[in-house]
Image (cartoon, rainbow, N blue to C red):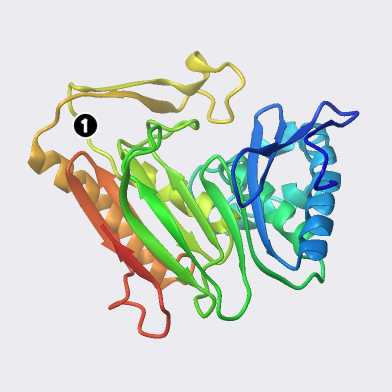
Amino acid sequence: MSQGAMNQTGMTGASAAWLPGYPRRLHLQHGPIDLVIQADGVPAAVAAAYDRAWARFQTILTELVSELALLRTALPDPSASTAMIFPRGHVARRMVAACLPYAVDFITPMAAVAGSVADEILAAMRDGAALDRIYVNNGGDIALHLAPGQSLRIGLVTRDDAPELGGFAELRSADASRGIATSGWRGRSFSRGIADAVTVLACNAAQADAAATIIANAVNAEHPNIVRAPANSIHDDSDLGEIPVTVTVGTLPISLMRQALSAGATVAHDLRRRGLIHAAHLVLGDCVETIGGASALPDAALEMVS
């Protein structure tokens, strides 16, 4: 996409525009997919990377829609004899790979769609180019590239539906984390739990996205002030079908919130032990749990400060 061009619309209905301010950020939008992208490096390499992002982005939604029925289907338990049918599209395959570790319980590949799209655009932008930094932010699910010596400070939200920051994650090139994702009942996707926000750092955005969904589901409790409804009663095409999802969380006893957050933290610790995540930041009301800070990651430069 030419640095001088302000707006473009693809034949598929996808749109691209530069956001105001400096450094320049590219905004790509198509249906429910909404990306904000920034790349740093040699100007010619940055311009070419933005062109590749735009070219790849224009086909992604069409590819996903063509296999939507499969992507909304629960993945089979790996220990069962059910044959696994893999999708054709690159993004769809990223989704399946990220969600397969959790297929012992109910999960569909849609749990990792936002992170997988971010990873796909990042891969297109890198494609051999020598760039210093890239981030692809898909509604808070972020894929990162950090060249040696580079770092990026990312704000952590306390609610998945609001911009208020509750801490920061400092990611450096020596760290293994290249993906960050947030999930919670207040966000744009359904949650079976009551977490305000669960932010996860992992190898890539797809893995972070799937794990954030799982951990947020585990931050759970029963109380009259917690209202749930079948997912398909809110959106009739939800991949969760009749599974109850959280609609409202009212005032809760502090002891109950701590218990719910502890349940989520237990799952996060297990995922970290299994190598599926690097760190997690869980928020429910005034209760906060952080798993995997600098003291817990002696071989990395990751710091999570709440």
At label 1, the amino acid type is Glu
Identified at 61% across, 52% down, the residue is: 23
Residue 87, above or below 292: above
Quick one: 104 or 161, which is closer to the camera?
Answer: 161
Quadrant of the image for the C terminus? bottom left
Quick one: 11 or 73, which is closer to the camera?
Answer: 11
Q: Classify mark 1: residues with Cα within 10 Å, few (<14), some (14-19) or many (20+).
A: few
Q: Position of residue 101 (x, y in %)?
A: 54, 59
Tell me which corner region of the image, top left, top right, bottom left or bottom right, holds residue 34: top right
Identified at 79% across, 47% down, the residue is: 87
In the visual, does 67 lie left or right of 177? right
* Residue at mark 1: 222
Tell me which corner region of the image, top left, top right, bottom left or bottom right, holds residue 260: top left
In the visual, does 45 lie left or right of 283? right
Tell me which corner region of the image, top left, top right, bottom left or bottom right, holds residue 129: bottom right
> In the structure shown, which secondary structural element does the residue marked by tag 1 occupy?
loop
Quick one: 177 or 232, which is closer to the camera?
Answer: 177
Q: Is residue 124 visible?
A: yes
